[in-house]
Image (cartoon, rainbow, N blue to C red):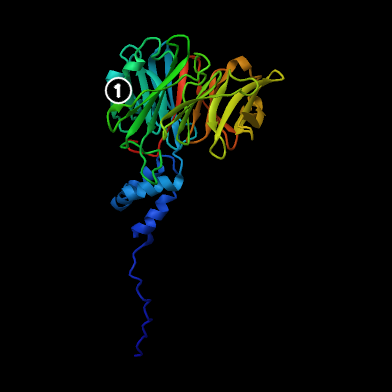
Amino acid sequence: MASRRRRPSSPSTGRGPPLEDEDLLGEILLRLPVQPPHLLNASLVSERWRRVATDRRFVRRFRIHHGRPPLLGLFRGYSHGYHIDVVSFRSAPGSPYCIPSRRFYLPSDGRLGWRLVDCRHGRLLFEHWEKREAIIWDPITEDHCFVSVPLQFRDPKIFSRNCNWAVLCAADEQGHVHGCCHWSPFKIVLVAIYRPENQAVAIASVYSSETGKWGDLLSTTDVPYVSSSITTASTLVGNTLHLAHIWGVIQFDLDAQRLAVAKIFWPPGVPYDVQIIHSEDGGVACATLSNLRDEPYFQMWERKVSCDGVPTWVLLKSVQLQQILGLGFRISKEESCIVSYAEDVRAIFLRVHFCIYMIQLESMQSKEFFVEINPLSTYHPFTSFSTEGF
């Protein structure tokens, strides 16, 4: 009986299935969409996948690869005078994972009497008029701490009435990407304008979570007059905070610790609806709602400096608001206004009649967020990479 020949076996590569190679698996997970719960779902496949997805080096690479944290939703506060009666969260529409409103709620000792004043780098900042305190809250980790207002700001003529608050991450290590700053140090910047005698004065101070103290008081008398701030929140461009006022912009340079006033004329139709934003190259620009031919137009202006050193505004875009939103009814200028700006995703939020809309500034595409019947509400976009707790 003839014997059968054996086929020569292929040489062994010594490698297991591709998805058991942690280096290759990491490269695959790195390319998952940034919105939750994609990375979270991947971490539930097996212990190996979870080990790779939660490794600190991988999480750091994931943030750097995507660059911008995703918009998770809006925090809405119903304000009455100097108090917040209700703070709620609305998940971003169209997101693959709808975060329930009850997932984010203030601690029991921080619900009543607190006014939501800022949100940046994954933290929210509240102030309390009567207690002369601020509370910094991380909705992801639910950590919070209280900070007393510095003595120079406790005068009833100064505190809250003409104050502007800002909270921001203070991490300065190389390669840090904002959006997962839960355990990073933070800073609070407090700026106020008041009239001690016959001259308007702007003052500022910075709180550091690393030292637990407020820094030196900075001031400038180069202020035309005391007035209410146009925007409800500052805009961080580079490492400088910009606060819009009727007569121009207050600038606080965090690196140089310098407070300055830029007296500039606003574009036509301003200062009733203006929001400092980022230009496409990372400079200073502004978004406005202007009334042209009895129709509201959404406009974007970039700040330029002439050869003589004079700052001016150059029109970049001017689009009829009706065209952007595609509504089937006539938009009233009196019933439309800018309510917020998301720095990380370059998006403007508008209140038009009884709805909140988002306009993505790069694509000029719009989304309806939710119906809003209370004109006193405030809105703060919340962005984060983190999926802990979801």
Per the image, the residue denoted by label 1 is 147
Q: Position of residue 343 (x, y in %)?
A: 48, 33
85 or 98, nearer to the observer: 85
Which quadrant of the figure contains the C terminus?
top left
Is 367 drawn above or below residue 47 in the view shown?
above
Q: Quadrant of residue 81?
A: top left
| Amino acid tagged 1 | Val
Position in image of residue 261 (x %, y %): 51, 24
Q: Position of residue 178 (x, y in %)?
A: 40, 39
Q: Is residue 38 visible?
A: yes
Res. 105 image quadrant: top left
As rendered, which of 297 and 369 lies closer to the eye? 297
| Left or right for 9, reference 280 | left
Q: Is residue 328 visible?
A: no
Say which residue appears at 53% left-offset and 38% top-offset: 282
Q: Residue at x 43, y 16 (%)?
A: 78
In the rendered view, tell whether residue 212 sits above or below residue 35: above
Q: Give above or below for 197 relative to 100.
A: above
